[in-house]
Image (cartoon, rainbow, N blue to C red):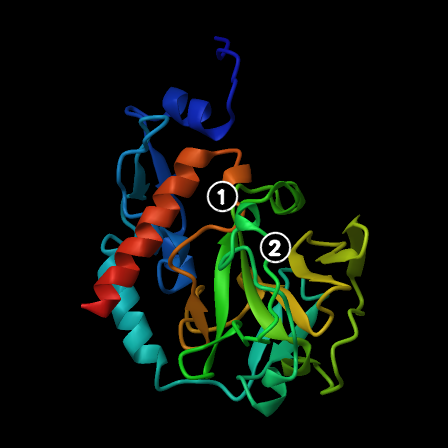
Amino acid sequence: MSLPQLSSGIWDLVHIILPHPSVQHWQVKDTGDGGLSTYLPGWPSLDSGCRLEVFSGQQNNTTESHAQVAEDDLSKLPSQLQARCHCGGIEFYITPPDASSLQAWSPFSDLLVPYFSGPGTNPDDVKWWLRDGNTKYLAGTCACKSCRLGCGFPIQTWAFIPKSNIFNTDGSPLAFKGKTVQRYNSSPGVYREFCKVCGANVFWHCDERPELIDVSVGLLRGNGARVVNLLDWAPDRVSFAEMAAQKDLVKLLEDGLAKLSRADCV
């Protein structure tokens, strides 16, 4: 038996294998808090007719779980949070915001000021990466081509952390070095670090804002994959959504982020 030629990746494959059009979240329990499945609660896709469902036997009420984990985590803010890749070749620690977190400067992220609306200059030096009374860092999702091709997945999650709050395991300041650290210059003045053994995405940073680092959220070893006691997730936009290869998935994610944000305000 031969399979028909696939034209659009995962969506077509799912249509062939599953009894009805569906994309399922696998290993949700491993996240501890539902991960991004919390923001993808199973609505029909606008473009492909697929559905996003929690896999049978796994976590079934991600919205309820989100609220419970967030409540539990608020009393467990760590003095430092471990970040470690799958093979352990890269390991570092992140501390909560402090006075040094205010010293960095950066233009606005595309999460907050979309690139198509004009330059995201920050003449008033707004510390947009600090949230919730300067007790958390902003985190968000990105669908740009560079992130997609670098991580091999339609969506990459980043947390915006001042370099002054990132330390090596021996307590020394971050130096982008380690046993398995490999750097890739994805464009002039832009740097991405990854693990050359297990392939984990680790950092994104650039010459324009050298003191503010994008840290891959998947490496953080918190009480849940979204680390809601230290990260505040941007609710209004997936960064560079216009560049997404799978726009239906990104639309579902943006809708889910907005819905949970509105629920939190009630």
Q: For numbered disc 2, what is the local secondary structure?
A: loop
Question: Looking at the image, which residue is at 29% across and 24% down?
Answer: 19
Q: Give the amino acid type for the residue marked by disc 2 in the picture.
A: Pro
**Looking at the image, which is closer to me, 123 or 229?**
123
Question: Looking at the image, which residue is at 56% across and 89% down?
Answer: 98
Above/below status of 155 relative to 192: above
Q: In which quarter of the image is residue 265?
A: bottom left
198 displayed left or right of 261: right
**Looking at the image, which is closer to me, 135 or 183?**
135
On the image, numbered disc 2 is attached to which residue? 119
- Kindly give the residue lying farthest to the left in the view shown: 266
Label 2 close to label 1 by CB (< 8 Å): no
On the image, numbered disc 1 is attached to which residue? 241
94 displayed left or right of 113: right
**Looking at the image, which is closer to me, 95 or 58?**
95
Q: In which quarter of the image is residue 71?
A: bottom left
Question: Looking at the image, which residue is at 26% across and 40% down?
Answer: 43
119 displayed left or right of 230: right
Above/below status of 75 relative to 197: below
How crowded is the residue under tag 1: few (<14 C-alpha within 10 Å), some, or many (20+)? many
Q: Give the amino acid type for the residue marked by disc 1 in the picture.
A: Ala
**Looking at the image, which is closer to me, 141 or 88?**
141
Q: Position of residue 237 (x, y in %)?
A: 43, 52
Q: Please identify the quadrant where the C terminus is shown.
A: bottom left
Q: Where is residue 158 in the image (x, y as percent from the top left)?
A: 55, 60
